[in-house]
Image: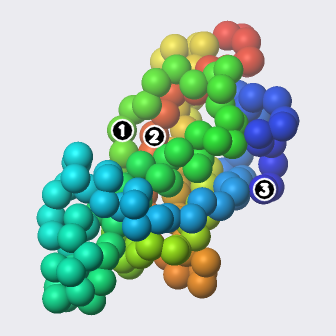
């Protein structure tokens, strides 16, 4: 990880600069997790049925894009970068599922500060974070940009 993180202090708006990046730990995706998530949220055959998945254009079981997005966000949250400073999310855009995620894949996320912009409210600013999730081979499987309102250390900053 580059910069502050799980063991470091919470980051505030004033601490962030465009280009700053953070790398998460890893998480292995299991077939059981793929199936359980998809049964609840995205029950398509190539997510829930290994036999049907073999006959699909994927040639095997793959995680739902929503599962990949959720796992991406969890890995990011595990860094606890903004635990004392996040006000609220402002939206997500440009979500792209770039390659299938399969059972056994090990995911890692790189988060880069893309924009740091003051708001009219003196106690916070808006930050755009670019997410790139890759597998164990370095293949990008997901890209997205999240905007969030982040507190300033003090209203006078």
Viewed as shown, does residue 79 lie left or right of 129? Answer: right
Q: Earlier in the sequence, mark 3 or mark 2?
A: 3
Q: What residue sits 46% from the left and 24% below the top?
A: 88
Q: Which residue is mark 3?
A: 1
Helix, strand or loop under label 3: loop
Tell me what residue is drawn at x 22 percent, y 48 percent: 41
Q: Earlier in the sequence, mark 1 or mark 2?
A: 1
The numbered dot on residue 60 is none
Report the Cα–Cα distance between label 1 and label 3. Answer: 25 Å
**Residue 83: image location, x then y, percent:** 65, 26
Looking at the image, is mark 3 or mark 2 nearer the viewer?
3
Of the pair 122 and 15, the residue shown nearer to us? 15
Name the residue at 78% across, 56% down: 1
Which numbered tag is attached to residue 147? 2
Task: Give neighbour class at mark 2: few <14, some 14-19, many 20+ (Cα, 10 Å).
Answer: many
Q: Say what secondary structure mark 1 lies in.
A: strand
- The reply to whether callout 1 and callout 2 are in contact (CB within 8 Å) is yes
Mark 1 and mark 2: Cα distance apart in space? 5 Å
Which label sits on residue 91? 1
The answer to which of 21 and 157 lies nearer the viewer is: 21
Position of residue 139 relative to residue 82, above or below, is: below
Query: Residue 140: x percent and y percent?
Result: 50, 76
**Residue 97 seen in the figure:** yes
- Left or right? Give the position of 39 relative to 84: left
Asked if the residue at tag 3 contacts the one at tag 1, i.e. Cβ–Cβ closer than 8 Å, the answer is: no
Q: Is residue 8 above or below residue 136?
A: above
């Amino acid at each position: 990880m580059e910069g502050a993180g799980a063991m470091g202090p919470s980051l505030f708006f004033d601490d962030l600069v465009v280009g700053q990046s953070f790398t998460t730990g890893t998480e292995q995706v299991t077939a059981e997790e793929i199936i359980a998530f998809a049964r609840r949220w995205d029950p398509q055959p190539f997510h829930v049925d290994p036999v049907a998945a073999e006959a699909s254009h994927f040639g095997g079981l793959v995680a739902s894009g929503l599962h990949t997005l959720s796992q991406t966000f969890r890995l990011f949250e595990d860094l606890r970068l903004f635990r004392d400073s996040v006000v609220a999310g402002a939206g997500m855009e440009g979500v792209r599922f770039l390659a299938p995620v399969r059972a056994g894949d090990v995911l890692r996320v790189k988060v880069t500060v893309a924009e740091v912009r003051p708001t009219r409210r003196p106690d916070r600013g808006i930050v755009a974070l670019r997410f790139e999730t890759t597998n164990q081979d370095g293949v990008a499987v997901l890209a997205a940009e999240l905007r969030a309102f982040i507190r300033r250390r003090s209203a006078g900053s």
